[in-house]
Amino acid sequence: MSIRYIEETGQLILETRSTSYQMKIDSLGYLNHLYYGPKVETTDMSYPYRIYDHGFSGNPYDMRNNRAFSLDSMPQEYTSFGVGDFRVSSIAASCSDGSRCAEFRYEKHEIIDGKYSIPGLPSVYDSGAVAQTLIVTLIDNAANIRIKLYYGVFESLDIITRAAEISNAGYEIVWLRKASSMCLELPFGKWDMIHFHGRHCMERQPERVPLFHGIHTLSSGRGMSSHQHNPFVILCDHEATEDSGTCYGMMLMYSGNHKTEIELDQFDSTRVVMGLSDDRFRWELAPNTSLHTPEVILTCADGLTELSHRYHRVIRNNVVRGAYKLSHRPVLINNWEAMYFDLNEEKLLALADKAASLGIELFVLDDGWFKNRVDDNAALGDWVPDEKKLPNGLDSLIEKINAKGMKFGLWVEPEMVSEDSDLYRAHPDWALTAPNRAPMMARNQLVLDLSRQEVHEYIFNTLSDLLSKYNITYIKWDFNRPLSDVYSRSTPSPRQGEVAHRYYLSLYKIYERLTEKFPNVLFEGCAGGGGRFDAGMLHYAPQIWCSDNTDPISRLTIQYGTSFGYPMSSVGAHVSATPNHQTGRLTPLSTRGIVAMSGAFGYELDLLKLSDGELAEIKEQVARFKEIEPIVHNGLFYRLSSMQESGHYFAWQFVSPEKDRSLVNIVVTNPLANSTPIHVRLKGLDPDALYSVDGEFECSGSALMKAGYTFTRLTGDYPALQVDIKQVK
């Protein structure tokens, strides 16, 4: 069993294949965190703690004569607030009497087989993995707040999940002002923080910094998980590398406003609190009602590579769902960068005809297909095909594309509305706008108030009608502006602080209804590129457009940062034109292909403008990807270098689960250094096996991993190479 309770000591022990997690109910009923790290079996891990007088750290009333007992120095599973622990708190609330404090103590616990689920929210599920759940209930009888802490233990995956349910156990309203999903204490050790910041067209840039005393806050108040701060953070030993060193990963499975606080306190103890953002958050807890928090996916691993592998496995197998979970994803062509808004049936069919001849399997019609959509200033919300651009109708276009042997996909941005639209003219109150205030505009569009049931139904019915009427097998779901002026005209004034979270409860429900009704449709998430790239969205859309920046050299760092937590099967990646439309950079077609083939593969350029030689190369790329897709999407991913370390090249590797095949990829990022030999040590191979390297020579796995491999000299601007390694015996 992966969860045990030792009554004599009050220990609750969670165990995975290689980690232990311990907590303890003390004599006063406080739930102390003892340990999370490499496996230590059942040893009572309270022994490292030395209780002594910390000076001006206060004491609970029960321990008023024991100055060594203080919540301000005690490691806790989920903190109280306002009662003497002055570090970052897990929760905050205003009680009916106006007080703002609560002291939580143990009430009961329950161990059940299987993995808990969270009403209305995405969560890791236990298909294909044996899981157990621990539910620990804490209560403050004065504040009448009860908290259930949920722990999901996936022993074989080395994954532990955390979530909380906060309930009003009294007879008066309680106002939640903060509701975190987890608190994790690391009382000992010195840690580096790795986080993933960014901006539009440059998402998930990894940054590693040592923790210093104080509170480090990573958050988004943009109404999405954001380009700026991904809801994923790693704490690791100062000396940790890809291959060794204690590393803790914490990933919030949520697509909206989030917050992670990491405090290195006065006693050199580290506390991590992660969950919903408390910025402008205020939730009414009426008597006998609850709020469920989003889930955190935790792991502790030896080295950054192993940490990544665990996240890749759990997301591929226990987060992503549906027909495309582990199966072939069609190679697509998206018409956006080929024609933008200047589209018509003739152009689209010409592009589709050329794509079909190259083996491309899916044609995606992007923005501009619906009435009055000639630019990005109008028509969002009116999802009716434009008869001027498509005089024979959307169904005729789809039939003609299907006749070429291609599937059809469609771009939509259903959460948005333009002021210049029939929808807004009919229902201006459906947009998020504050009273007596001109709203902030972004791309000249507003956001629909998904917290309203009629808006929820409108979006669901609109998409359901499109998918029912037309033979659409793929939806690119875009979200091109942040939430501001967050005010709902259907919500009472005291409860406006609930709107941002209710927005996502509604969005997830729409996705749930659509994926259940249309199980064979492939959804791809998008938010101005990678602005909503998170595990919550991957529960519904198995791939996400990684970035609007399709320049392969920029994509190296974007995809590198993304790879720390998310599998490459989730990374939407396209070959685009050169000069690149975002950066103006010139790169070889082979380089663009190798970089894009490390994700969910496709094209986004005008095939009609390419030479016969370029078309022949694309045909080879398409065939190549179809052949290597299983190892790219379901194999093990290794970062062999980083730009910061190597200086002039970037290398990465895929290895099949059976270790019988590997792909090693290299891109030279500094053309001035082309004359410098590029030598890398490979990873993940069977040391005792013999491999052929590009069919040119044979070498043992141990030699390739310990002595390494030297790449053929590459010349020119941004050259790239993919080496095929196959086991021969």
Image (cartoon, rainbow, N blue to C red):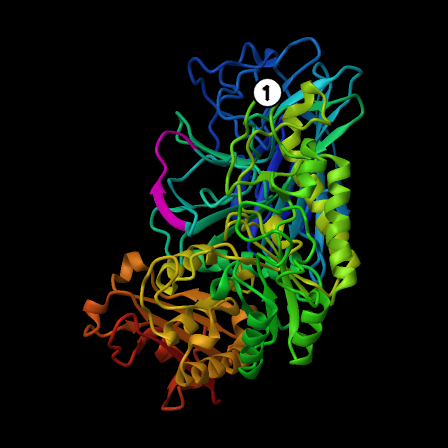
Q: Is residue 239 left or right of residue 251?
A: left
Q: Which one is nearer the viewer's eye here, 228 or 146?
A: 228
Was residue 7 drawn as part of the magenta stretch in this picture? no
Magenta stretch secondary structure, dominant: strand
Q: Is residue 649 left or right of residue 433?
A: left
Instruction: Kindly indicate the quadrant of the structure image that contains residue 657.
Output: bottom right
**Residue at image x 56%, y 23%?**
437
- Looking at the picture, how far across and down is residue 201, in whole percent? 42, 52
Q: Which residues are magenta?
A: 205-216
**Residue 703 vertical placement versus 390 (above, below):** below
Was residue 211 drawn as part of the magenta stretch in this picture? yes
Instruction: Kindly indicate the quadrant of the structure image that contains residue 351.
Output: bottom right
Q: Which one is nearer the viewer's eye here, 216 or 329?
A: 329
Instruction: Kindly indicate the quadrant of the structure image that contains residue 707.
Output: bottom left
- Looking at the picture, how far across and down is residue 84, in whole percent? 53, 16
**Residue at image x 66%, y 80%?**
405
Q: Which one is nearer the viewer's eye here, 28 or 224?
A: 224
**Residue 228 vertical placement versus 433 (above, below):** below
Residue 497 visible at all: yes
What amino acid does circle 1 point to? Answer: Asn
Residue 683 visible at all: no
- Looking at the picture, how far across and down is residue 1, in whole percent? 70, 52
Mark 1 residue crowding within 10 angstroms, few (<14) / some (14–19) / many (20+): few
| Label 1 residue SS | loop
Q: Is residue 255 left or right of residue 638?
A: right
**Residue 148 vertical placement versus 130 (above, below):** above
What residue would you read off at disc 1? 436
- Looking at the picture, how far across and down is residue 419, in whole percent? 60, 38
**Residue at image x 78%, y 27%?**
289
Q: Which one is nearer the viewer's eye here, 258 or 342?
A: 342
Count numbered badges in the picture.
1
Q: Is residue 454 left or right of residue 719?
A: right
